[in-house]
Amino acid sequence: MAFIAGAGATNVDLLYQGFDRLAGVGEELYCKDFSLQLGGGLPATLINLGRLGIETRIATELGNDIFSNFAREKLLENGVSPTNLYTGDAIPLNITSAIILPKDRTFYSYGKGTIEPDDKALETFYNIAKGAKICMMQMGGFLPVYKKLKEEGTILVLDTGWDDEMSFEKYDEYLTVADYYTPNRKEALRITGKDTEKDAAYALKKYFDKVVVKVDADGCIGIDGDDFFFCPSVEEFKNVDSTGAGDAFLAGFMYGVFYDYPLKDCIAFGNITGGKAVTAVGALSGYVTEKELLEYKSKM
């Protein structure tokens, strides 16, 4: 059980930087900087884990187009073994053009957002995830696989993202099967219906003995049994672009879980990887190696 697995859609970002304003209708502007990168989400978390030296596997949808070929190359380059779930002729990825202004960002996206697996896709995902120490969970059609893996002893880590209709009732099946859930402040307040982060954290005790609530740039709340604590963010990391911060946090957190660290240390690892992620533009530009992660941790 020496690897981490997950299933989810792959995202590719076209990042345009250096604009002072958005173009009006019929106008054309040239940017000063451009980059093509893999975007955020589950693949970004697995890539960050691969960079930390952990074997990772992903079931995703890849075609024969230039964006799929780019994504496949980047996954392999960063230690993630991809298994394709797609058999059609279209472009199956999510593709986003991000226009980055001095104080804001605008996004234009193509794609369907998530994967809707059929029975064959479920079987394929189970076959690559079987025996994983940790499996990442997302909302969607892979729940039968998560349940089966749970029965076999795999640790399940849930990442939901934002949903206007978040609630315990709607997410009960996923929360019940998950071992860990790492919502941010906004998600925790919405899903629990509470008014404060602390109250939301204690409400999550309904499902979890070990609770995690990210409180944005400030750091992270944790509850381990009866022990309530707060892990502050790393001060030296200055925010340039918050894209991918949550995905990077999750990678550091799961690094700790993978190596059986106490919850407080897992959160500290997450604060390091998440904090480093915001120091550069793009979901995967700012990251730490395993050596750097452990060095940062030793100073905390």
Image: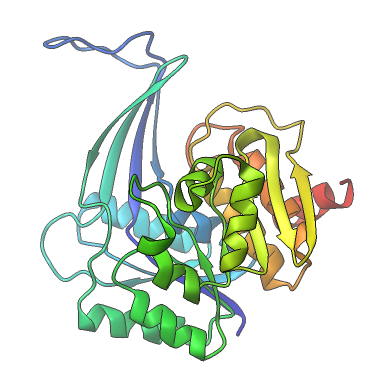
Residue 134, image quadrant: bottom right
- Give the tally of numbered discs: 0
**x then y, percent, for residue 88:** 12, 66
- Colouring chosen for the image of the structure: rainbow
Q: Is residue 81 visible?
A: no
In the image, what residue occupies the spot 42% across and 68% down?
A: 172
Decide if residue 147 is on the left or right side of residue 260.
left
Screen quadrant of the N terminus: bottom right
Q: Can you name the residue that lies furthest to the right here?
A: 299
Decide if residue 216 is on the left or right side of residue 13.
right
Residue 82, image quadrant: bottom left
**x then y, percent, for residue 51:** 60, 58
**x then y, percent, for residue 3:** 57, 77
Q: Can you name the residue that lies furthest to the bottom here?
A: 152
166 or 121: which is nearer to us?
166
In the image, residue 81 above or below residue 2: above
**x then y, percent, for residue 230:** 77, 46
271 or 241: which is nearer to us?
271
In the image, residue 26 above or below residue 258: above
Decide if residue 27 is on the left or right side of residue 106.
left
In the image, what residue occupies the spot 22% across and 83% down?
A: 120
In the image, what residue occupies the spot 59% across and 50% down?
A: 200
Q: Is residue 135 visible?
A: yes
In the image, residue 275 above or below residue 134: above
In the image, what residue occupies the spot 11% across and 11% down?
A: 26
198 or 294: which is nearer to us?
198
